[in-house]
Amino acid sequence: MALIIKRSQLPGAGKGLYTTKAIPKESKIIEYRGEIIDYYEYRRRARRQEDHYLFYLRREWSIDAMHTKQYKARYANDAAGITRLKGVRNNSYYGIFGDKCFIVASRHIKAGEEIFVNYTKPYWDCMRKRLKKK
């Protein structure tokens, strides 16, 4: 897959993940990679609010991409997040295959499109709660 990082089209989102080639529906786009941590470390990082790039696979296996900027999957944004653009929708989802997590196309994605993946409602509920506290 030919993927590049550049400014996201979502206001305030920072960088985004884009494809330079068309991606067929249900294709694995990219593996979500990072540091492998256990549940207790996952909870510790979440309590310290170091959970922006955490992906929970199961109790004994989570992925933290916070300090692994070389792995491009971490740059995929959620079109249904805090800032939204009219007409922009998620075009992929996280799929778990054994001990690995991939971003998978939920529809045909055209060359040049930004990859948007659903972070889930619990993630955004947590982020909104934190923003209210600030």
Image (cartoon, helix red, strand yellow):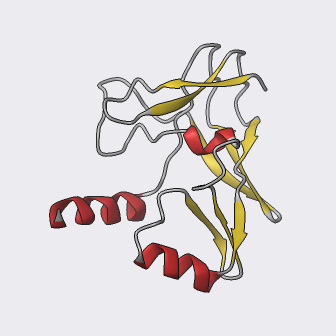
Q: Nearer the viewer, residue 21 or 43?
A: 43
Q: Residue at x 72, y 53 (%)?
A: 33
The spot of residue 121 in percent (x, y) is 39, 59
Q: Nearer the viewer, residue 77 or 44?
A: 44
Quarter where residue 40 is shown: bottom right
Quarter where residue 47 is shown: bottom left
Please indicate whether residue 8 sits to the left or right of residue 41 in the image: left
Q: Nearer the viewer, residue 87 or 76?
A: 76
Q: Give the quadrant of the C terminus.
A: bottom left
Q: Give the quadrant of the N terminus.
A: top right
Quarter where residue 71 is shown: top right
The spot of residue 26 in percent (x, y) is 72, 37
Q: Is residue 61 above or below residue 25?
A: below
Q: Residue at x 65, y 13 (%)?
A: 111
Q: Is residue 44 above or below residue 49?
A: below
Q: Residue at x 62, y 82 (%)?
A: 39
